[in-house]
Amino acid sequence: MKSRESKPQIIYYENELEDEFSKAQITPRKIDGTYHYEGGVLRKLGRCVLYYGIGRPLANLFLKWKFHHRIVNKECLKQVKGTGFFLYGNHTNDIADALIPSMIAKPCGVYVLVHPNNVSMPVLGRITPCLGAIPLPDDKEAMKHFTKRIEHVIGRSQCVTIYPEAHIWPYYTGIRNFKDSSFRYPAWLGVPVFCFTNTYQKRKRGRTPQIVTYVDGPFYPDAGLPVREQKKKLHEQVIAAMKRDCQHSNVELVRYISRQNERQT
């Protein structure tokens, strides 16, 4: 059995914005104008049964068992009770990242903007939309349905979760610089933004670290600014909060090193 203090695995990266380290190998389907973002009666029924009846309770049990999961400052969401909102987080765990937003926003329903991979699997691809997966569109026609779906979810006072880093870096303890493009949604709809930062902390027993999630917000779009400036301001507020909270991590299972920096030394 390895010691909890063993040296971290080393992973080299080329591009902080584009490199992906998830082990899943899936050929994505094209999300075009024929993709049904709303779904029909079966999807709505599946949402009630699979998400609220089965998925959320099991997610809570799994996170407690596997990661001893704890949330700090969840109560800040009470400030926008009855209002739809966007939730931004760091992308560092393939399984936990799919579950944690529902624990943060509970009892509010959660939807997540995802890569088409998440709706392309033979069986799970039919289930993930019931669990809240909203795939990113591949053409203009799909974009119309995509934006309509987001507007509908927010209009029903639900939560839309976005991982602005886009790519999974397992157990990464920092915050990668990400673009402000995804902040156009709250600026467009004029709704509040929250962010969460998953940190990895030592446990008394076992090598698997505890995940402690820190929640910050609300941050509001400044309607007095052009949309471009609203996006920039929200981006700055969120990334500052996340970079502050990530300092709580005190376990490093994986260390990511820039190949560019290596070449320069």
Image (cartoon, rainbow, N blue to C red):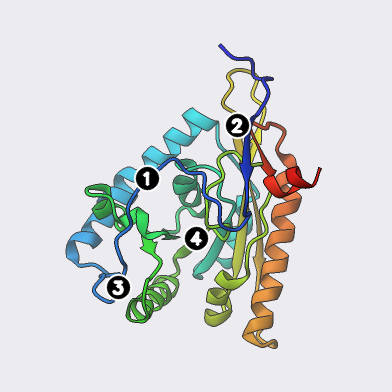
Cβ–Cβ below 8 Å for labels 4 and 3? no
Residue 210 bears which disc, if any?
2
Counting from the top left corner in percent of width and height, residue 61 is at 43, 34
Q: Please name which of the two marks, 3 or 2, marks the residue nearer to the observer.
A: 3
Q: Please name which of the two marks, 4 or 3, marks the residue nearer to the observer.
A: 3
Q: Please name which of the two marks, 1 or 3, marks the residue nearer to the observer.
A: 1
Quadrant where the N terminus lies?
top right
Q: Please name which of the two marks, 2 or 1, marks the residue nearer to the observer.
A: 1
**Marks 2 and 1, the one that precedes in the sequence:** 1
Q: CA distance from mark 3 to mark 2?
A: 40 Å
Q: CA distance from mark 1 to mark 3?
A: 21 Å
Q: Observer-nearest residue: 257 or 238?
A: 257
**Marks 4 and 3, the one that precedes in the sequence:** 3
Q: Observer-nearest residue: 78 or 163?
A: 163
**Marks 1 and 3, the one that precedes in the sequence:** 1
Residue 32 bears which disc, if any?
3
Q: Which residue is mark 4?
A: 161
- In the picture shown, does residue 21 fall above or below 153? above
**Marks 1 and 4, the one that precedes in the sequence:** 1
Q: Which residue is mark 1?
A: 25
Q: CA distance from mark 4 to mark 2?
A: 22 Å
Crowding near the residue tagged with mark 3, few <14, some 14–19, many ≥20 C-alpha atoms within 10 Å: some
Identity of the residue drawn at 37% across and 38% down: 58
Counting from the top left corner in percent of width and height, residue 244 is at 76, 51
Residue 42 bears which disc, if any?
none
Crowding near the residue tagged with mark 2, few <14, some 14–19, many ≥20 C-alpha atoms within 10 Å: many
Identity of the residue drawn at 38% across and 63% down: 134
Circle 2 SS class: strand
Amino acid on which the number 2 mark rests in the picture: Gln
Cβ–Cβ below 8 Å for labels 1 and 4? no
Pick out the residue farthest to the front: 263
